Amino acid sequence: MKFSVAKFGGTSMADAHIILKSAQVVAKKNEIRLCVISATSGTTNQLLSMSEQAKSGKIPLHEFEQFEKRHTTISLGLESNPDIKDKIQQSIKRVKELLEAFALLKQTPLSALDEIASQGEVISSYLFLSALRHLKIPSHLVDAREIMKTSSDFGKAKPHLDLLKTLSQEKIAPLLKDAVIVTQGYIGSDLENRTTTLGKEGSDYSTALFAEALEASEVQIWKDVPGIMTTDPRIVPEAKTLHFISFDEVSELTRFGAKVIHPDTFLPVIRQGIPIYVGYSQNPEVTGTKITAMTEASSRVHALSLKKDVTLLSFKTNEPLEDFISLLPPFIHLSSSNQKFIFIFDKLNSPTKDQIKSLDKKGSCQMKTFDLIALVGPSLPYTDLLKDLSSYFENPRYINYGTSETSMTFTVPSGEGENWIKKLHTHFIEKP
Ligand code: ADP
Ligand code: MG
């Protein structure tokens, strides 16, 4: 049977109206048989932040009530049946119990953090089921924790691929013929049936894993924007959908800040050659983006991305890279020339004071914060682009070319990134 696996991200699950629109996608697209659902927008972060606050000994009651209200309001808006309402209530209750336990213990055991985080996906999967039933689409929910068996590495569990395949074939495949199956992204369970999570961008990863295990013929990613766009439409409203884009380009866009799809997490489907389509959950008639292995040979800039407040560390040393690289947190970029190394770190992953102290013993380092801009295209003509860009620059800024010809990045002063994106979008994309 040919069928598609569809993922609905948090932004497509923001409120009852948006969830109903997302469910209408399934009504219109008969090929969708499995839906992988993320927690409602912002919920995973909220659950983790409430857990952190509970460690002080008191649960953040006001925030908990907001969380509860948000979900009961959506459930009401979708006219959930009593069974579904009950399931949602159970999850909300579990969140409160766990927060109370964290407050009592003044700590948050890793396994319990996964359990509390997973409630976001559990609730939203029931909300989506409600929406499908509201539209009279025959549908069932399969709890991902019965299928996505993982290691016990809480917070970043690794899937047991063989078990996942067997269980998917046994417990999901036979149902797909007669109903649409709803399951959760991001969550799973270990061999002792304790809840686990797959880590950041986990829903994308789950989607790819389910599609691989079920040998689906297509993956569809439904977002709150019409596909992958020339830049973030929140910065540039004129941004346009790219109807075709290569995996390499998506990879560079994501690495340098665009929230599109995470290619690492899509490796399972990329390996299988399963095509990926990115569409607009609020109107599936609008043509979205097909991600392909290659796009047409063009030397144009296809897209721009912005990563705000990155830390740039330049380090002069006579020591070889192997001798100090382990002292640093994970970086998004590294380049070197004549014993000078340049590292770029995400804001949330900057080197600590202690790390800098230990580096200083091996050479001299300087740190500065910048906004990072990336130009992305299939084969960028670096020399021409550089000439073009130098007409914008007053002083030389740090400029770097990607490892392939798909990206060129440069830094601009912190806080000026959005203005640069606007200017560059006009220059390279609207009026090339
Ligand atoms: P989801 O909930 O579907 O996982 P994300 O959190 O990944 O959604 O973010 C979606 C947002 O990413 C969009 O609302 C959009 O504003 C932003 N975005 C940034 N750059 C791009 C781009 N190049 N194309 C599309 N969306 C982008
Ligand atoms: Mg996402």
Image (tube, grey):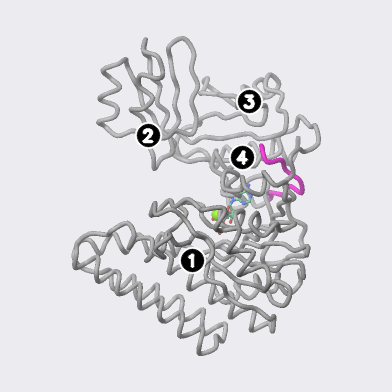
What residue is at 76 percent from the left and 67 percent from the top? 31
Residue closer to the observer: 21 or 425:
21
The three-letter code of the residue at mark 2 reads Pro
Nearer the N terminus, badge 2 or badge 3?
2
Q: Which numbered tag is attached to residue 329?
A: 2
The three-letter code of the residue at mark 1 reads Arg
Residue 359 rendering spot, x and y as whole percentages: 30, 22
Nearer the N terminus, badge 1 or badge 4?
1
Q: Residues within 10 Å of mark 2 (few under 14, many from 20)?
A: some
Nearer the N terminus, badge 1 or badge 3?
1
Question: Which range is magenta?
Answer: 238-248
Foreground disc of the pair 1, 2: 1
SS for callout 2: loop
Q: Which numbered tag is attached to residue 389?
A: 3
Q: Residues within 10 Å of mark 4 (few under 14, many from 20)?
A: some
Quadrant occupied by the C terminus: top right
Q: Residues within 10 Å of mark 1 (few under 14, many from 20)?
A: many
SS for callout 3: helix
